[in-house]
Image (cartoon, rainbow, N blue to C red):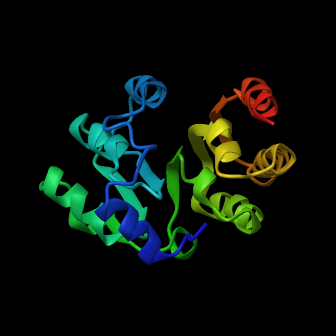
């Protein structure tokens, strides 16, 4: 699978973004709705069309940042939410972000990574989170399986993330549909 800037941009240009719900993910919305501190510095890596960023921004959160490789995705956000601060829209590589955040939102970014980058992902999350920071997200295991990640790699990766970010509070929604997906996949063979 091609994970280059050009490939991601082409996916957004061609609307080949089946994972995009077109709105904030309901579990993340529920999590956001219980947050009281509107000053939290929040990062959404691989934010794409950033419906989560839009929801947070419209809910009064003032320090929401999105990083994505796709210029088209960033432009889509600018068109949809013209009042969103341009300086909070980062066209670039997550692994090159150099800042510290109270909260990082995981929404399909993990599944889009080359498996060789999983350890780097965990280390970068550890680096970007403030000491009492939170990684909140949906680790969509069934999507990872669909794009070809082996279940053992997924489990190992999530454990690695927990171990490396142990200094931080972590709140995760882990979508565990592994058994059903494995059963479905084995019945196809």
Q: Nearer the viewer, residue 87 or 142?
A: 142
* Residue 82 placement: quadrant: bottom left
The mark tally for this picture is 0
* Residue 89 placement: quadrant: bottom left
Check the picture and name the quadrant holding the C terminus: top right
Q: Is residue 82 left or right of residue 117?
A: left
Residue 77: x percent and y percent? Answer: 24, 56
Q: Nearer the viewer, residue 183 or 4?
A: 183
Q: Residue at x 82, y 43 (%)?
A: 151
Residue 116: x percent and y percent? Answer: 76, 68
- Farthest front residue? 189
Residue 47 in sight in this render: yes
Q: Nearer the viewer, residue 165 or 167?
A: 165
Q: Residue at x 70, y 26 (%)?
A: 177
Q: Is residue 145 left or right of residue 49?
A: right
Q: Residue at x 35, y 51 (%)?
A: 64
Residue 81 in sight in this render: no
Residue 118: x percent and y percent? Answer: 73, 61
Q: Residue at x 75, y 30 (%)?
A: 178
Residue 83: x percent and y percent? Answer: 13, 54
Rendered view: 87 above or below 49 = below
Check the picture and name the quadrant holding the N terminus: bottom right
């Amino acid at each position: 699978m091609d994970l280059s800037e050009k490939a991601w941009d082409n996916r957004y240009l061609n609307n080949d973004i089946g994972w995009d719900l077109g709105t904030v993910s309901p579990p993340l919305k529920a999590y956001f709705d219980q947050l009281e501190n509107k000053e939290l510095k929040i990062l959404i890596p691989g934010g794409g069309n950033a419906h989560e960023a839009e929801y947070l921004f419209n809910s009064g959160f003032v320090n929401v940042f999105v990083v994505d490789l796709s210029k088209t995705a960033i432009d889509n956000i600018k068109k949809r939410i013209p009042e969103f601060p341009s300086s909070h829209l980062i066209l670039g590589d997550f692994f090159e972000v150099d800042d510290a955040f109270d909260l990082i939102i995981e929404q399909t970014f993990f599944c889009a990574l080359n498996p060789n980058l999983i350890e780097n992902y965990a280390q970068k999350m550890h680096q970007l989170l403030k000491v009492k920071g939170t990684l909140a997200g949906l680790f969509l295991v069934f999507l990872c399986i669909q794009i070809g990640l082996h279940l053992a790699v997924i489990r190992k990766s999530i454990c690695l993330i927990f171990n490396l970010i142990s200094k931080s509070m972590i709140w995760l929604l882990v979508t565990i549909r592994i058994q059903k997906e494995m059963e479905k996949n084995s019945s196809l063979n």
